Amino acid sequence: MTIRLAGSQPSRGAYSGAVTIQGESTSLRVPYLCMVSDNTGGDMVPVLGGDGFAGVPGEKGFLLAFKLIDRFGVPVRNAAVRFRVVSGGGLIERGDATTDVFGIAAAVVDLGPRAGEQQFSADAAGLTIDFYGRAQP
């Protein structure tokens, strides 16, 4: 059995429903969800490093990542991204310049040279997400 969605793309939003498949003695209800993005950032969700991270001063290679979604919860693709060091003297080794097809962008960061709070942030689509950590001896 093949079910196809045909025609022009619907307007932005989320569409749901169910298809009922009827057999000789049973029927099966199969739910569906179709989401069409407006490709405008509505929220940033932490994927890695958002719950806080800890290491020793100067430790290298922490991965931070977020997902950019629109108001319908659909990933926003190809949005420009800028990662920044906010406090703690850390370093951004490398960071994605745009979100991928899943709305995700990531950066590899190093902690600063002294013990204490570490903060990095990412900007995309007019939104900002902060990543907090700590360097401890």
Image (cartoon, grey):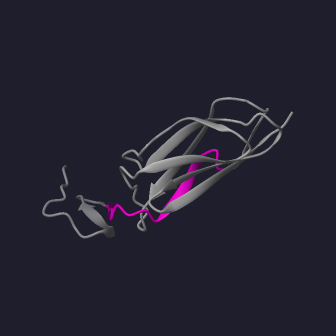
- Where 61 falls versus 98 (above or below)? above
Residue 78 % position (x, y): 36, 49
Residues shaded magenta: 29-50
Residue at 23%, 58% (x, y): give it.
Answer: 24
Is 134 placed left or right of 34 in the picture? right
Q: Is residue 30 visible?
A: no
The residue closer to the viewer here, 22 or 41, is: 41
Residue at 71%, 41% (x, y): give it.
Answer: 89
Residue at 41%, 46% (x, y): give it.
Answer: 98
Magenta span main SS: strand
Residue 49 % position (x, y): 64, 44
Q: Quadrant of residue 39?
A: bottom left
Residue at 31%, 66% (x, y): give it.
Answer: 18
Q: Is residue 22 magenta-colored? A: no
Q: Quadrant of residue 71?
A: bottom left
Q: Is residue 35 magenta-colored? A: yes
